[in-house]
Image (cartoon, grey):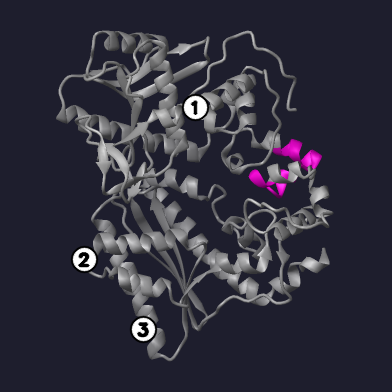
């Protein structure tokens, strides 16, 4: 247990985000609010908040320009005053309210805001609609949607629901808060405007409220100090302000979640395995149900963690596909808006040269087609040169999912423009032996107790990034400054992004060379543990 559990004297209020958050974090947030307020701001969280705010404002302008009669609740001032204004607008029968703040409820412990409240003209009450900066649907069929400007729900033959539990919990909490004031629509529906902002996904709350109520009872009891929690490593820990504190406790106790995070730790605890030491001594059969990955690898991770080995070889030899002419590729994108940079490192005849293909117009932009077309033309030329010279060719990336996604998406979006290939051409390339995922080579040949990300593995090969803040989330903030989302474009941030991208492609080069030449000598084999 992290700290003595005690009933708090002041009212505890939680937002719906707590319902999909780590239970122990809910406890820490509520128990130590001063420490939380003093924690350093996470750059990734900051840029996501800024992007979400820009998306909300874009949707607001679109709605206000098309429809008169909106009631807008002031965005500043005390929350209590904004809540009073919201309830007054509802009592006055406003059809459309933007920026709604519902009254905090000390008795139930709820607080919440809804970008939009729509009056249900047929049944009475209000329908909460949230605006979020992520996808809420995917191509398909079966989702219930309605247009932005009229609430007319219907089955959509072009979209399917992309499950977003956090959205469901948020609109369910808003419904319960409206219900508390007699302002909830009897239809028990809510909406979400997602990335793209061209429709409203309709949530049927009758299918959500039971789960919401159960989660809320659990989280509010934790926040009030009525239920004990303990730290455990999960995916959320990477960006949690409490992670340093929790990790120290987990390391001290050798908690098994350090090598088997999330549901895997839950399964192990049910089997009586609570520490890394317990797992390293495992000599029985594998569990009947294992949530993710290889159980045998997890046991090796436990042994490696105790031995202080950051990497373990599976085999006597280490192999990665090599070629006479090699090109390292790393793509940089900004959320779902577009891929603004294709960085390359050409390695031929003993020399290496970095060449970026970028657009500095804020994505999405037509100029993205130019930069992508130039990248593809250059890459194709290198393949042809290798063929003419009778040389072998290979292009490398690290974790190909993002590169594959934007290669295919760019071909679809810009097909027919100069230099842009067809989707079939891209598919033929990424399915060929010439497209090599170094991440997969690492996964196949090593057990990685500390993770398999490039910034975890490349330093073992001797690579260092010039920028200590380099990372995917930090680069999002740099990009906003580089293209001038909030002001004049900053050329220094453009250079920062180029150097970061260059360091990434150099990292894959150094990593595969290390795997070819030195890894077998420097990394212990499984049997050596």
Q: Is residue 24 left or right of residue 415?
A: right
Q: Which residues are magenta?
A: 247-264
Sequence-wise, which precedes: disc 2 or disc 1?
A: 1
> In the picture, residue 115 is in which quadrant?
top left
Mark pair 2, 1: CA separation: 51 Å
Q: Nearer the viewer, residue 204 or 449?
A: 204
**Residue at image location 72% in from the left, 73% down from the top:** 315
Q: Are marks 2 and 1 in contact (CB under 8 Å)?
A: no
**Residue at image location 28% in from the left, 70% down from the top:** 421
Sequence-wise, which precedes: disc 3 or disc 2?
A: 3
Q: Is residue 387 visible?
A: yes
- Residue under pointer 2: 417
**Residue at image location 21% in from the left, 33% down from the top:** 62
Q: Give the foreground label among 1 and 3.
A: 1
Q: Quadrant of the N terminus?
A: top right
Image coordinates for residue 262, horizontal then vertical, percent: 64, 43
Mark pair 1, 3: CA separation: 60 Å
Q: Nearer the viewer, residue 210 or 165?
A: 210
Sequence-wise, which precedes: disc 1 or disc 3?
A: 1
Residue 210, which numbered label?
1
Image vertical order of residue 484 relative to residue 499, above or below: above
Q: Are marks 3 and 2 in contact (CB under 8 Å)?
A: no
Q: How many numbered circles are shown?
A: 3
**Residue 263 colored in magenta in the image:** yes
> In the picture, residue 136 is in which quadrant?
top left
- Residue under pointer 3: 384
Residues packed near mark 1 inside 10 Å, few (<14), some (14 to 19) or many (20 plus): few
Image coordinates for residue 100, horizontal then vertical, percent: 34, 19
Mark pair 3, 2: CA separation: 21 Å
Q: Secondary structure at mark 1?
A: helix
């Amino acid at each position: 247990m992290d700290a003595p559990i005690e009933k708090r004297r002041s009212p505890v209020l939680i937002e719906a985000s707590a319902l999909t958050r780590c239970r122990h974090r809910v406890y820490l947030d509520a128990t130590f609010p001063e420490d939380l307020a003093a924690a350093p701001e996470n750059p990734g969280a900051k840029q996501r908040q800024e992007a979400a705010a820009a998306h909300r404002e874009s949707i607001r302008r679109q709605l206000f320009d098309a429809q008169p009669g909106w009631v807008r609740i002031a965005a500043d001032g005390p929350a209590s005053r904004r809540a009073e204004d919201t309830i007054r607008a509802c009592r006055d029968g406003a059809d459309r309210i933007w920026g709604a703040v519902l009254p905090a409820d000390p008795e139930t412990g709820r607080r919440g805001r809804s970008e939009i409240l729509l009056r249900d003209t047929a049944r009475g009450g209000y329908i909460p609609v949230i605006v979020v900066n992520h996808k809420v649907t995917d191509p398909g069929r079966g989702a219930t949607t309605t247009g932005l400007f009229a609430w007319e729900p219907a089955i959509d033959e072009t979209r399917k629901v992309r499950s977003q539990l956090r959205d469901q919990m948020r609109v369910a909490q808003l419904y319960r808060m409206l219900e508390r004031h007699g302002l909830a629509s009897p239809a028990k529906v809510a909406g979400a405007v997602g990335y793209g902002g061209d429709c409203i996904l309709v949530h049927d709350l009758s299918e959500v409220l039971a789960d919401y109520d159960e989660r809320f009872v659990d989280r509010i009891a934790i926040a009030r100090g009525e239920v004990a929690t303990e730290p455990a490593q999960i995916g959320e820990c990477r960006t949690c302000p409490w992670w340093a504190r929790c990790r120290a406790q987990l390391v001290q106790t050798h908690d098994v979640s350090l090598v088997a995070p999330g549901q895997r730790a839950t399964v192990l605890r049910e089997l009586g395995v609570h520490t890394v030491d317990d797992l390293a001594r495992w000599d029985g059969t594998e569990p009947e149900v294992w949530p993710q990955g290889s159980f045998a690898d997890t046991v090796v991770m436990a042994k490696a963690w105790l031995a202080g080995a950051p990497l373990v070889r599976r085999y006597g030899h280490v192999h990665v596909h090599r070629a006479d002419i090699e090109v390292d590729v790393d793509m940089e994108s900004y959320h779902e808006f577009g891929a603004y940079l294709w960085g390359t490192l050409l390695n031929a005849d003993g020399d290496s040269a970095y060449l970026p293909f970028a657009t500095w117009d804020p994505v999405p932009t037509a100029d993205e087609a130019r930069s992508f077309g130039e990248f593809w033309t250059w890459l194709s030329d290198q393949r042809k040169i290798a063929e003419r010279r009778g040389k072998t060719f290979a292009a490398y990336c690290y974790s190909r999912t993002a590169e594959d996604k934007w290669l295919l998406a760019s071909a679809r979006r810009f097909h027919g423009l100069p230099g842009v290939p067809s989707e079939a051409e891209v598919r033929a390339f990424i399915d060929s032996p010439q497209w090599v995922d170094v991440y997969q080579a690492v996964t196949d040949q090593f057990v990685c107790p500390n993770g398999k990300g490039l910034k975890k593995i490349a330093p073992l090969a001797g690579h260092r990034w010039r920028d200590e803040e380099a990372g995917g989330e930090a680069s999002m903030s740099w990009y906003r400054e580089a293209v001038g989302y909030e002001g004049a474009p900053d050329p220094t941030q453009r250079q920062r992004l180029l150097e970061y991208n260059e360091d990434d492609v150099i990292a894959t080069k150094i990593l595969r060379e290390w795997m070819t030449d030195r890894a077998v000598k420097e990394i212990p084999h499984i049997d050596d543990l």
